[in-house]
Amino acid sequence: MDGRAVSGSNIAPRSGDAVAAEAALWVVRTAGPRLSGQRDPGFERWLVEHPSHRSAFVEASALWRDFGVAVAGDRAGARATPARRWSWPKLTPAYGWSAALAVCLLLFIGVQRHFAASPVYMTAVGEQRSIRLSDESRAVLNTDTRLEVEYTDADRRVILDRGEALFEVAHNPDRPFYVEAGDDYVRAVGTSFTVRRDPSGVEVTLLTGKVIVGKIAAAAGAPHLTLRPGDRLKLNGAGAAPIIDRPVIDNVTAWRRGELVFDATPVPAAIAEMNRYSNRRIVLRDGADVARARLSGVFDIGENENFAKTLAAIYGLKAAKTTDGFVISGQSAASPAR
């Protein structure tokens, strides 16, 4: 790792209040009547996004069940019965209203504290957005991005649920700045860097200053990586070793000026990158040799039709427009830029 793996103190855990409030919300949503036996996909994603989520949900679920059992047990002559999982307490005038009011109060406090302390910012597919945080730090959100801000007196924390963002961090050594992306964290004091999170993993590119990157669940003192300006760290998960390279920074941040720069990029990867910025998706078919070819050039984001036509022209293929995008098909006459 180029000698940059060092040991140091680990990241502090996420705000317990925010996680508890989220867990309470999910308990209510999953406990209510549903049209099918399947749980909400959003809940499933939330459950695995952070190590603290599952334990917080278990605790909130137990509290929810205990309300129903405890109040029911106060009824004269009532026989205690186990509470069914995912079921609502029966809200009858005889004994249920006190439980309902208690739970509603708990949820009201939790939700109020959660949204007061944890603003959420999002962008749609193809949208970019610049936000100014309360400490004068700045974040530029790229396409289809969702992040949550949790600031305390001790530290500044941003949770990147998905997508990509560029951070310009206001200098404050007494309140370190963290970005959490899945199981990984990035810590900075005053610097600028990008973090990208998608199903394939996490990428961190340092523009200026200094950051360290480590595992959230690691023990205190566990090794972490220190990046230098110009470094890009790729964390692909599944036990894969971290990769550090030094790309052309202007290419990495080209999305800020509405462009994508490909430099001998595999055609399928170039198509996938264009598809991040448009709901009119490009699909490559019947061109196995093109799938192994590489593409170089500068393209405007969101211009999938022009990209599909250009790609087809380069390789002698056909670009057909469909109701929701474009299909590139046929055998290529030649395969330049291999």
Image (cartoon, rainbow, N blue to C red):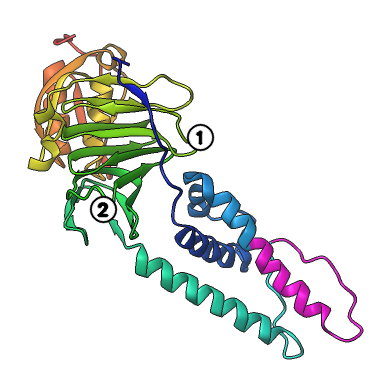
Q: Could you classify mark 2 by the number of other residues whose Cα lies within 10 Å: few (under 14), some (14-19), or many (20 or more)? A: some
Q: Which mark is residue 181?
A: none
Q: Which one is in front in this view, the residue at disc 1 or the one at disc 2?
A: 1
- Residue at x 33% of width, y 51% of height: 157
Query: Is residue 199 shown above or below 66?
Result: above
- Residue at x 61% of width, y 62% of height: 60
Does the stretch in magenta take in 145?
Answer: no
Left or right, 219 with reference to 143 = right
Q: Quadrant of the N terminus?
A: top left
Along the viewing direction, whichever of 269 and 330 lies nearer the viewer: 269
Q: Which residue is mark 1?
A: 219
Q: Which residue is mark 2?
A: 124
Left or right, 191 with reference to 84 = left
Q: Which residues fall within the magenta stretch? A: 61-85
Which quarter of the picture shows residue 84?
bottom right
Left or right, 61 with reference to 70 = left
Left or right, 141 with reference to 114 = left
Measure the alpha-carbon separation of dots 1 and 2.
36 Å
Give the image location of residue 139, x and y in percent.
20, 50
Does the stretch in magenta take in 79?
Answer: yes
The amino acid at mark 2 is: Ala
Give the image location of residue 270, x and y in percent.
22, 26
Which secondary structure, mark 1?
A: loop
Give the image location of residue 77, x and y in percent.
92, 84
Which secondary structure, mark 2?
A: loop
